[in-house]
Amino acid sequence: MWLSLAFLSALLLGAYDTCKKASLNGNAVIPVLLLNTLFCSLLFLPLILLSKVAPQTIQDTIFYVPEADLRTHLFIFLKACIVLSSWLFAYFATKHLPITIAAPIKASQPILTLIGAMLIYGETLNVYQWIGVLVAIVAFILLSISGKKEGINFKHNIWIIFILLATITGAMSGLYDKYLMSHGFHRMTVLVWYSYYQLALMLIITLVLWYPKRNNSTPFVWRKSIFFISLFLVCADFVYFYALSYPDSMISIVSLVRRSSVVVSFTAGAIFFREKNIKHKAIDLLLVLIGMLFLYWGTK
């Protein structure tokens, strides 16, 4: 069940990446990210109110948000800091890079997560899962190499560095998620409150870094896709944390499957954004799908 949830999360994550690219093209990054955190928080507000005022209405459902002590909130605040760091790097990179380059590089995140999961959590993979992981890793590397045909110098491009930093911090977040879920932290408590902490942090960043210099930078333009960034992200994260709550779930596999969202991003890049070298990258994407199939067979 947890693997099926991971695939659903990947689909939603691909839609999130597509809306993010549509929102950021020629737009100011920081206010877009601020609105993203705001809408995520607002989407969770009814669940917080119901859990506080009338807990009996949703207490036995997957939407209930339990009370949390100070220690729990400190752990969640750390989660917010890690995720927001990854988002800041990823948003700036997404604005300046083709999605068919940024998404595949970000898709290499499970390699780092896998190494961390094996070193920290002692996770082991069966033969089918190893084949799936290795095929997917090769596919992600080939996708990244294909991006060089876009004329981008990978060694001296700051946005490539940003997407690499987003990948590293994203892997840290995935490993930390597994720690939280395996140590009794309720998935809804983590999911809801880290959104509010991110909103608070983004308010500070916006007021200090962007607002005073807004007239000298890229102007902000409202687009409907900005709201859908939040909607798809909330749904993707909800399904993701639900998958991790299963005792037998493996963060290395869940993280890798989530990165298959690159298929959705790739398709959007070809259809909506008219990006280049699509035929060369299609073969690499086929390898991604083959890798996902082996992962699925390995959990049977």
Image: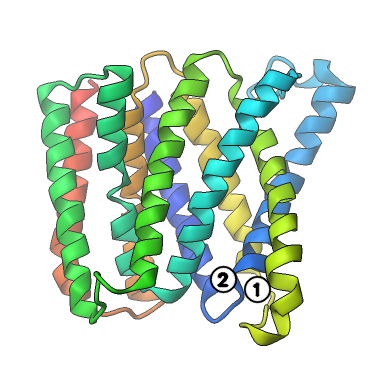
| Left or right for 59, reference 116 | right
Q: Position of residue 221 (x, y in %)?
A: 67, 79
| Left or right for 55, reference 149 | right
Quarter where residue 273 is shown: bottom left
Q: Is residue 61 placed above or below 18 in the rendered structure?
A: above
Q: Secondary structure at mark 1?
A: loop
Residue with the mark numbered 1:
223
Q: Is residue 34 placed above or below 184 in the rendered structure?
A: below
| Left or right for 272, reference 37 | left
Lower sequence index among marks 1 and 2 = 2
Is residue 187 something one can see in this rendering?
A: yes
| Left or right for 33, reference 272 | right
Kindly give the residue lying farthest to the right in the view shown: 53
Residue with the mark numbered 2:
23
* Residue at the image point whose x is 37% and y is 47% from the top: 168
Q: Position of residue 181 (x, y in %)?
A: 50, 20
The numbered disc on residue 61 is none
* Residue at the image point whose x is 18% and y is 37% from the top: 133
At label 2, which amino acid type do we have?
Ser
Q: If the image is split into quadrants, where does the N terminus sit? A: top left
Q: Position of residue 223 (x, y in %)?
A: 65, 73
- The scheme the figure's colours follow is rainbow
Q: Dots 1 and 2: beta carbons under 8 Å?
A: yes
* 178 vs 156, nearest the viewer: 156
